[in-house]
Image (cartoon, helix red, strand yellow):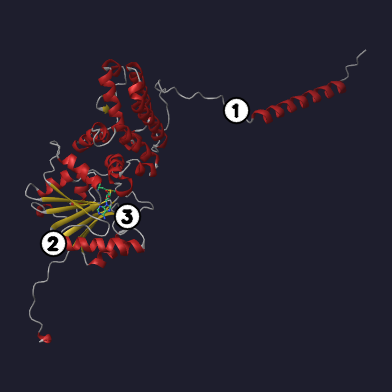
Amino acid sequence: MTVDSPGRRLRWSLLLILLLILGLMIRLVLTGPDEQPPTRPPSPAAPSPKVERQASDDPSAEMNALVEVLEGFIAYLQSHPHLSRAERVDSLARSLNRSDAILEAASQATRSSLAIFKFPLRRMAEELSELDAEAMQTLSKHFNERGYQGGGESWTFDPLEEVLYRTVFHDQDYIEPALAMQIMAWEVKGEKEPIWSALGPERDEDRTKADTIRQFFTGYASTRSGHVQMTRALHVLDPETLNGCVWAELGYGTGKIFEAVREAVGPQGSIVGVELGSGYEALIERLSRHPSLNWGPITLVRGSEDDCGLPAESVDIVHETGIHVGMGSPETLETRTIPWLRSIKRAMRPGAIMVLDDFGAPSIDRVRLVMARVGLEEVRVEFFPTTRTNPPQPDFVAAFRKPAAKRPGPPDLKAR
Ligand SMILES: C[S@@+](CC[C@H](N)C(=O)[O-])C[C@H]1O[C@@H](n2cnc3c(N)ncnc32)[C@H](O)[C@@H]1O
């Protein structure tokens, strides 16, 4: 006979609760707190669903996702001869669909900062159009053989970008397109060493071709265009005095300022470009032959880090952007920068002006000290509100003049 007393029921209930708590604790120890259901990685073929999210202006996630697409395209180009037509179409359509999904979900600001991807995306779109125009039609309306259309102004191609695009993505004699894209992927990922080693025999004696490609994928699409550079220079130069001048562009890189310089100096003026190696010259020689670029004749001079290589008293305007004149250690200042600036001063005609535009790095104080060392006189400094430097310091363009030659003065009576 069982006696169901209240005390006994209470003991049983307490035991049950204890067992329940114990069970819960064991589960927690074994599985971890509140495990999320595993998420499936998105299929590269299918556009991801539209994600409602706070638009962030940090493009790193989209950047990484697009680099993955790019690496897929590089692999495609390398295996290209072994793929059937259907496989090629499928691979390209996947890459473009995936890119579209990434870009569509991005904020407008993020898309602008991803504009370098317009080059490989256009190449993919062109290739798919050629292979299968119908497959191209089924892609998002944002794509056509000119690339991705939803990116705003930075995603359109200006005349120089157009010619650079054809050189880098179609001119096998200049560079293998797969290698160009590989350089782009390394550049975006910040892996510089493989870029320098990538161009084989040029590696040791001349890294400059690799640098033109690197600059093409960074400086050109993401920083100031040549016309913006010129507008900034005209804050410290008088445009009326430029017609017919000899303009020396130091560190011309991919040549993006040349069109604007030709407009400023006119057909009677002369343009001299100074750079450090044959890679830059090879690029500019190719580009300057192109009928859509109205550069006119350009003289290329090979300079070095301590000598600009220009003949004495040969130029009226010297301009540079991106060399960061005055940065570096006290040692490089003495062994390179000061001798280099002295060689520039020698090349300037009396009264000629040198314009420096280096994103505020180094600071204006540093620039003033360095220019005073070589005897170039400050003419004008114009400050701009934005800066890319970190920590922020004022962005400016500065003009310095070579003093006009002293006229023979009245005879020094004391010396007589
Ligand atoms: C950041 S890039 C800028 C290129 C170009 N000015 C632009 O805005 O696209 C700097 C360029 O200056 C060149 N450079 C650096 N030091 C130089 C020097 N002492 N003489 C000539 N070019 C130099 C580099 O080779 C490189 O191409």
Image point 16% across, 41% down: which residue? 288
- Residue at the spot of label 1: 35
Q: Residue 42: percent from the left, percent from the top?
A: 45, 24
Q: Residue 400: percent from the left, percent from the top?
A: 20, 61
The residue lying toward the viewer, choosing from 357 and 105, is 357
Residue farthest top in this picture: 1
Image quadrant for the C terminus? bottom left
Q: Is residue 149 visible?
A: no
Is 357 placed left or right of 268 in the picture? Answer: right
The residue lying toward the viewer, choosing from 407 and 27, is 407
Q: Quick one: SS at disc 3?
A: loop
Is 310 placed left or right of 136 in the picture? Answer: left
Image point 50% across, 23% down: which residue? 40
Circle nearer the N terminus (1, 3): 1
- Discs 1, 2 touching: Cβ within 8 Å: no
Q: Residue 395: percent from the left, percent from the top?
A: 29, 53
Image point 13% across, 46% down: which residue? 262
Give the label on residue 361, or none.
3
Q: Which of label 1 and label 3 is nearer to you?
A: 3
| Amino acid at the residue labelled 2 | Glu
